[in-house]
Image (spheres, rainbow, N blue to C red):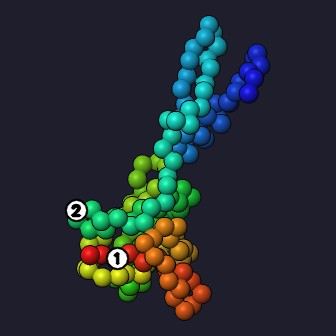
Amino acid sequence: MLLQPNRPLYTLPAMLESVRNGRRFCCAVVGLTVLVIGLAACTTPYKPAPPAPISNGIQFTISLPEAQSVAVAGSFNGWAVDTHLMLRQGTNGVWSVVIALPEGEHAFMYVINGKTWMAPPAAQDFVTDGFGNTNGIVVVR
């Protein structure tokens, strides 16, 4: 992309929106001109990962920037939509919760804003539930 004189690469509102969406910028002052360069290397894109064991349970993580609330419902909590509420991590829309689960295979889904059921984007395995939905499977050993 060629820079044109007196034509900003990014407007201030566009930069602020990009920062809110997790992008970072590097600024350089040249004379009286401020150059703003978006750096892809500065961002850490979210890569879907299956639930993972950590010291105190299984960590469920998902990126849903537009969600107001996210919960994990599954065979381990009677498919309750309000038992395992996730917490927003920072400002990039990633949600996370750690759940202590007993050994075995557990089916789960995410519940967005208390009403929208969503199959996980990543899991150790998947199974259809007989109602037309796909559940993720997490195996605890």
Q: Nearer the viewer, residue 11 or 27?
A: 27
Q: Residues within 10 Å of mark 2 (few under 14, many from 20)?
A: few
The residue depicted at 45 percent of the width and 70 percent of the height is: 123
Q: Amino acid at mark 2?
A: Ser
Vertical placement of residue 107 versus 7, above or below: below
> Residue 13 vs residue 21: left or right?
right
The residue depicted at 42 percent of the width and 72 percent of the height is: 124
> Residue 57 vs residue 9: left or right?
left
Q: Residue furthest left?
A: 55
The residue depicted at 45 percent of the width and 76 percent of the height is: 125
Residue 108 lies, in percent from the top left, at 43, 78
The residue depicted at 56 percent of the width and 32 percent of the height is: 39
Q: What residue does disc 2 label?
A: 55
Residue 99 lies, in percent from the top left, at 30, 70
Residue 31, picture quadrant: top right
Mark pair 2, 1: CA separation? 15 Å
* Residue 108 image label: none
Mark count: 2
Q: Assign the N terminus to one quadrant of the image.
A: top right
Q: Residue furthest top?
A: 31
* Residue 139 image label: 1
Residue 76 lies, in percent from the top left, at 34, 82
**Considering the numbered disc 1 on the image, is that residue within a helix, a strand or a loop?**
strand
